[in-house]
Image (cartoon, rainbow, N blue to C red):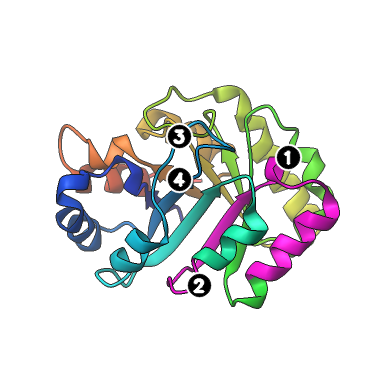
Amino acid sequence: MIIVSPSLLSANFLNLEKDVEMFNKSNAQWLHYDVMDGNFVPNISFGPQILEQVCTITDKFIDVHIMVANPLETIDYFEKCRIDMLTFHYEAVSGLEECNAVIDKIHEKGIKAGISLKPKTPVEELKPILHKIDLVLIMSVEPGFGGQKFMPEVLSKGDWLNSYRVENDLDYLIQIDGGINYESGKMAVEHHCDCLVAGSYCFNNSVNFNHGVDSLLSLKK
């Protein structure tokens, strides 16, 4: 089964409640929430206060992606938020010790832990921690801005992650984010991605939101 996680970054901020209600009525299973600090990435987005309010108007799975320079400290900022999956960047930690500390802290709070890779980071670097992670997020654009063009060269990471998952009897999900539409989503699914993050394709869909969501859900592995 494919999971679709529409990215709130592409919603209409002047009508955020309306857009969340539109998401609630759709078949999308997760809601993707991007946190950017203007340091790790050259953009600033949402903080915990907005997420806390969003969580009061949806019961669906909350999928948070923190693009921040200090993930270990940032986790505490979201103490009052209902989060189901919290994904941080491998490039934001100083080494394996800090990486494990972030994963452990997320799990201690009863949240699933995900780890994300920028397009140019080799996926093999994640080997030491894949046994304790719940999700790997492959960035198919440079993180920081929505609406970028999909980078097909990252798809081989999905193949590698799936092979490693099968060979080692692991059950982490493979997620992809960046430039996802029906065509790129189809390629991603063919390369073993389980979860598709889609911003513009859903919220700015020229037909309608449900059409964007349902077209991605129709993709088969």
Residue 78 percent coordinates (x, y) = 49, 66
Whether residue 102 is in magenta: the answer is yes
Please identify, in this view, whether the residue under mark 3 or under mark 1 is nearer the observer: 3
Residue type at mark 4 is Leu
Please identify, in this view, whether the residue under mark 1 or under mark 2 is nearer the observer: 2
- Seen from the viewer's position, the closer of residues 138 and 111 is 111
Q: Is residue 149 above or below residue 37?
A: above
- 201 vs 2, left or right, is left
Q: Residue at label 1?
A: 160
Please identify, in this view, whether the residue under mark 4 or under mark 2 is nearer the observer: 2
Residue 177 percent coordinates (x, y) = 49, 39
N-terminal-most mark, 3 or 4: 3
In the picture, residue 182 is in which quadrant? Answer: top left
Q: Residues within 10 Å of mark 2 (few under 14, many from 20)?
A: few
Q: Is residue 15 above or below residue 30?
A: above
Q: Residue at label 3?
A: 43
Whether residue 107 is in magenta: the answer is no
Disc 3 secondary structure class: loop
Disc 1 secondary structure class: helix
- Seen from the viewer's position, the closer of residues 181 and 133 is 133
Per the rendered image, the range of residues in magenta is: 78-106
Query: For the point 63% across and 34% down, which residue is it?
Result: 118
Task: Using the image, tell me which numbered label, if any, was put on residue 196.
Answer: 4
Q: Residue at label 2?
A: 79
Residue type at mark 3 is Asn
Spatial CA distance of label 1 from label 2 is 34 Å
Q: State whether residue 181 appears in this view.
A: yes
